[in-house]
């Protein structure tokens, strides 16, 4: 009898311990953060609610984000790339890997094995030079890509907003900038090869190029690909393109006090805002640094979209936009405003809320005319903060000669 009571008591104690342990596990899980060594310095990651989104998941699985930029250092350890078969968060064109009928590697056989119009385009394409090499000589693109999809919970460096998304590397800018023709081709490549989000951290002023850009953007939009672009860094109300095109989601930048960055452009075309001052991300050759610009606000938005599409792959661009707009955290004056748009983009909402598929196209009027060749020479300008420091004047704007972090910020070691 006493033995039986003792046994019961022991079982109760055991159950209480087990229950506490389970509760403890639950508690830990509800605040679980990835173990990346520089995470605590990523104020922007926390500001968009990526911590909450991370603990709930998904993490961008199955979503390809095309980064149209200066290329990407795909071998940066924080992307987890080992080789073409184990490529971490770098997108690989499966039609250009493996062995061809002559026993040669498809990735380097000088053949367009998947007949997509590009030879050996195994991890993307360089539209500046018309070749497969997407080396980032500048650092801007690597920085942008890291904000979207640096690997999380690898004990290393930073966590991306969508740390399981894949980056498609489409180089459209050299260190001196680029031309709209490259952007047009790159948008079409992204759509035709499976990207669901296109990040464009660059821009130019209102000019006739918009005809070309509208056609490329229409193509992406019609095929269900979401476009995101930077508002630009001139503290100006003049619209920046492609951000100001209706079918593109335009991002302005805020600082860690939730105030508009002093350089951030504004206007009716701004849809959302995101962190863009003192942002920590990746630099080529395995480095990390802080930098500022609407360029770096934009990939926060792209990352959140990747999270949303990971949950709801069939959402149209208009559904995505309306969901993000509705769930954004309002800043500044009440409601939609020219500085913050609908407010700060919210990753937690993107993974935990039902999408809102009720917003419909308001009937954008498109101008479809032939593109005069002279438009093709119009320069693009990277939308990093320091681009405003150099005075080029006139219609053709120049790119900043050095990446922002080389001048204005101190590199950080992991
Ligand atoms: Ca190909
Ligand atoms: Ca090939
Ligand atoms: Ca990491
Ligand atoms: Ca507002």
Image (tube, rainbow, N blue to C red):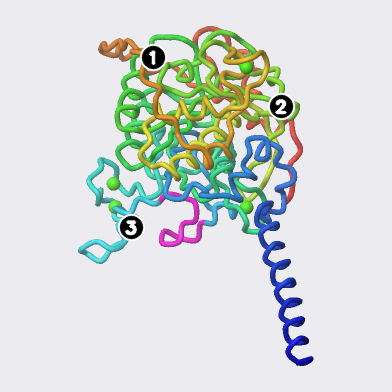
Residue 364 in the image: above or below residue 64: above
Question: Is residue 82 shown in magenta?
Answer: yes
Residue 71 in the image: above or below residue 97: above
Q: CA distance from mark 1 to mark 3?
A: 36 Å
* x and y, in percent, of residue 294 in the image: 60, 25
| Callout 1: SS | helix
Q: Is residue 22 left or right of residue 225?
A: right
Residue at 59% over, 33% down? 346
Splitting the image into 4 quarters, where does residue 63 fall? Answer: top left
Splitting the image into 4 quarters, where does residue 258 fall? Answer: top right
Q: Is residue 62 left or right of residue 16?
A: left
Which mark, by number, is residue 198? none
Splitting the image into 4 quarters, where does residue 283 fall? Answer: top right
Instruction: Give the residue furthest to the front.
Output: 1
Residue 182 in the image: above or below residue 80: above
Near-viewer residue (136 or 236): 236
The answer to whether residue 323 is visible is yes
User: Looking at the image, is mark 1 or mark 3 nearer the viewer?
Assistant: 1
Near-viewer residue (152 or 167): 152
The residue where tag 2 is placed is 255
The residue where tag 1 is placed is 210
* x and y, in percent, of residue 378 in the image: 43, 16
Residue at 66% over, 23% down? 386
Task: Tell me whether circle 1 and circle 3 mark residues in contact (CB < 8 Å).
Answer: no
* First in sequence: mark 1 vs mark 2: 1
Q: Is the residue at mark 2 in contact range of ligand 4, meaning its CB lies under 8 Å from it?
A: no
At label 3, counting other C-alpha atoms closer than 10 Å, the crowd grade (few under 14, some 14-19, many 20 or more) is: many
Q: Give the residues drawn in magenta, as a range.
A: 81-91
Q: Is residue 57 left or right of residue 193?
A: right
Predominant secondary structure, magenta span: loop
* First in sequence: mark 3 vs mark 2: 3
The residue where tag 3 is placed is 97
């Amino acid at each position: 009898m006493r033995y039986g009571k003792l046994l019961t008591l022991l079982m109760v104690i055991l159950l209480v311990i087990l229950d506490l342990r389970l509760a403890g596990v639950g508690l830990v899980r509800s605040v679980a953060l990835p173990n990346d060594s520089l995470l605590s310095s990523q104020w922007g990651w926390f500001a968009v609610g990526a911590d909450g989104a991370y603990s709930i998941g998904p993490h961008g699985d199955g979503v390809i984000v095309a980064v149209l930029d200066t290329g990407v250092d795909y071998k940066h350890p924080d992307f987890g790339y080992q080789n073409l078969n184990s490529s971490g968060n770098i997108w690989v064109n499966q039609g250009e890997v493996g062995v061809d009928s002559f026993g040669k590697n498809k990735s380097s056989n000088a053949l367009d094995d998947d007949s997509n119009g590009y030879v050996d385009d195994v991890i993307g394409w360089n539209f500046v030079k018309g070749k497969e090499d997407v080396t980032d000589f500048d650092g801007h693109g690597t920085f942008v890509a890291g904000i979207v999809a640096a690997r999380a919970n690898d004990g290393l460096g930073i966590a991306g907003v969508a740390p399981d998304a894949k980056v498609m590397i489409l180089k459209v800018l050299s260190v001196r900038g680029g031309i709209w023709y490259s952007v047009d081709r790159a948008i079409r490549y992204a759509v035709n090869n499976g990207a669901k989000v296109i990040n464009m951290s660059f821009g130019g002023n209102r000019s006739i190029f918009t005809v070309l850009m509208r056609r490329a953007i229409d193509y992406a939009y019609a095929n269900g690909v979401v476009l995101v672009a930077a508002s630009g860094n001139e503290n100006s109300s003049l619209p920046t393109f492609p951000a100001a095109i209706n079918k593109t989601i335009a991002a302005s930048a805020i600082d860690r006090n939730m105030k508009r960055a002093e350089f951030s452009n504004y206007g009716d075309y701004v849809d959302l805002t995101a962190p863009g001052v003192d942002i920590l991300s990746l630099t080529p050759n395995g480095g990390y640094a802080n930098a500022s610009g609407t360029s770096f606000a934009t990939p926060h938005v792209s990352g959140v979209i990747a999270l949303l599409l990971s949950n709801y792959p069939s959402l149209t661009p208009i559904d995505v936009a309306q969901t993000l707009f509705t769930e954004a955290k309002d800043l500044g004056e009440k409601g939609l405003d020219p500085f913050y748009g609908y407010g700060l983009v919210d990753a937690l909402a993107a993974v935990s809320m039902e999408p809102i598929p009720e917003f419909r196209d308001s009937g954008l009027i498109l101008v479809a005319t032939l593109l005069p060749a002279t438009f093709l020479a119009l320069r693009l300008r990277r939308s990093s903060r320091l681009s405003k420091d150099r005075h080029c004047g006139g219609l053709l704007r120049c790119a900043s000669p050095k990446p922002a972090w080389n001048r204005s910020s101190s590199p950080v070691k992991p």
